[in-house]
Image (cartoon, rainbow, N blue to C red):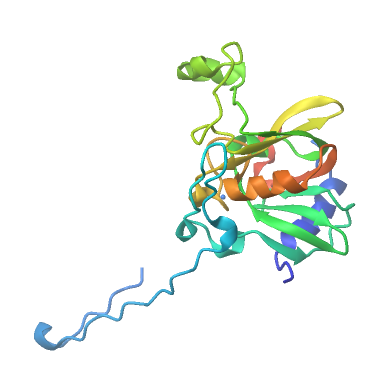
Amino acid sequence: MTDRSSSAGSLTRRAFVIGAGAATLAGCVSARPPSVAPQPQVPVREKRVRPPMYEALPDERFPIPAVDISRLEERFWRAEIDYDAREVPGTLIVDTPAKYLYHVRPGGRAVRYGIGVGRDGFSWAGRAIMAYRREWPRWAPPDAMVARQPELEPYSIANGGMGPGLRNPLGARALYIHKDGKDTLYRLHGTPEAWSIGKEVSSGCIRLVNQDIIHLHGSVRDGSPIVVIPDPAKRHLLAV
């Protein structure tokens, strides 16, 4: 399978050359009497079969339900593809405009994941490292977020954050991105909201369905390079 989206390859090169540092048919009225009018033809949609990789994970610390693939476009299903990344194997490439994440493998291959991009996912771009990973992480909103949303005070850093679980915004796994030894506050994390993959969403950073973030968590290594391609339409959100 070859990746047909030209966004990732071309933007990877272009974005950083220019400084990438830093989601009716009009009904025909029949002239026939209603009693003899033909019945409308209803398109028959083939029911998609859920692939094994998106089945439920009952043995997780918090059992994860199966992915509702009726809410996840097939083009965003996890797949291993041909991919000329021109990056060393192990590199993570986040293509925010195309809503894909690539984990580069040897031999011109990569595992491609569909992603949803939250507002914070547009706030940083460039090169860094995936410093460390966590299973069923705690979530603590930054103090600035708590100041804007006082209802989050119980989950503040001072209060120890929100405990792990299916309702935790970081999902089943989280990968933490550092640059020059400092936390960028940029995260790759899980979500149960399959409908949000391939879209721009109101909160969070880079989200994958829980089954995909678990797969990525198990194959990536701490210290791996990461390249985040900015969305030209969202450059105003990049942190200075």
**Could you tell whether 84 is left or right of 120 in the image?**
right
Q: Residue at x 81, y 53 (%)?
A: 12
Return the residue nearer the eye: 78 or 227.
Answer: 78
Q: In the image, is residue 58 above or below residue 169?
A: below
Q: Residue at x 83, y 48 (%)?
A: 91
Quadrant (top left, top right, bottom left, bottom right) of the C terminus: top right
The part of the image, by quadrant, that contains residue 227 is: top right
**Could you tell whether 64 is left or right of 158 in the image?**
left
Q: In the image, is residue 181 above or below residue 233?
A: above
Quadrant (top left, top right, bottom left, bottom right) of the N terminus: bottom right
Q: In the image, is residue 33 above or below residue 104?
A: below
The part of the image, by quadrant, that contains residue 171 is: top right
Q: In this view of the protein, can residue 87 be seen by the observer?
A: yes
User: Tag count in the figure?
Assistant: 0
Return the residue nearer the eye: 65 or 186.
Answer: 65
Q: Residue at x 43, y 70 (%)?
A: 47
Return the residue nearer the eye: 158 or 146.
Answer: 158
Residue 88: give x, y in percent of width and height: 90, 52
Residue 228: give x, y in percent of width and height: 76, 44
In this view, which residue lies farthest toward the top?
158
Q: In the image, is residue 157 above or below residue 63?
A: above
**Could you tell whether 81 is left or right of 154 in the image?**
right
The part of the image, by quadrant, that contains residue 85 is: bottom right
Q: Residue at x 85, y 42 (%)?
A: 225
Q: In this view of the protein, can residue 209 be seen by the observer?
A: no
Residue 183: give x, y in percent of width and height: 76, 26
In this view, which residue lies farthest toward the front?
59
Residue 170: give x, y in percent of width and height: 59, 34
